[in-house]
Amino acid sequence: MRVTTVILDEKEYTIKELRHRQNKEWREKLEGYIEELAAAVEAGVESDITELTSIVQLVRAVVKYVIQSTDLMCELVILYAPNLSEAVEGSYDSEIADAFVEVLKLAYPFSKVIGTLRQLTSDLPQTQRSLPLRNGGSGTTK
């Protein structure tokens, strides 16, 4: 189990990684919000963007999600760590955004996997480039 520390309402709090099923449910909730945004963008793209009204509709749809993004992050942080509800409500937007990033790291723990893969691949011998000969044949390696 992983644990992270966040600052909310100018105080330090700990958030624990949820168990698989709870993490899955949280990720599905996030996916629902992303699907809503994608559908709004897709509807705008599928319309005739040469018409001003279509462009305005697309901008309105996207701006709505941008404007509501901090509220959405609040909701998602509280869903992940309900015990922090009061702290989230009294926080600065920057603290909420930072906490949301930390929650994402707990919900999607790929950083360790990626780090391990990088380490494994860095241990592999590096290939060298062959320099071609003037006559077109393969040459020596450098």
Image (cartoon, rainbow, N blue to C red):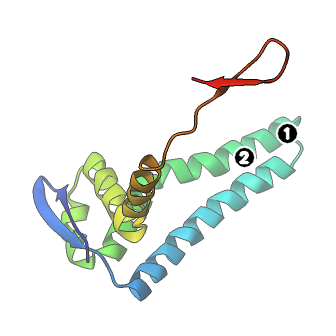
Residue 40 x %, y %? 70, 57
Q: Which mark is residue 76?
A: none
Nearest the viewer among 18 and 70 is: 18
Q: Badge 1 is on which residue?
A: 49
The answer to whether marks 1 and 2 mark residues whose Cβ atoms lie closer than 8 Å is yes
Q: Amino acid at mark 2?
A: Leu
Residue 131 x %, y %? 68, 21
Q: Say above or below: 75 vs 68.
A: below
Nearest the viewer among 109 and 67 is: 109
Q: Left or right: where does residue 89 sit relative to residue 36? A: left
Q: Badge 2 is on which residue?
A: 58
Residue drawn where x is 68% and y is 58% of the image: 38
**Residue 34, quarter of picture:** bottom right
Residue 24 x %, y %? 47, 81
Mark 1 secondary-structure assignment: loop
**Residue 39, quarter of picture:** bottom right
Q: CA distance from mark 1 to mark 2?
A: 9 Å
Q: Amino acid at mark 1?
A: Ile
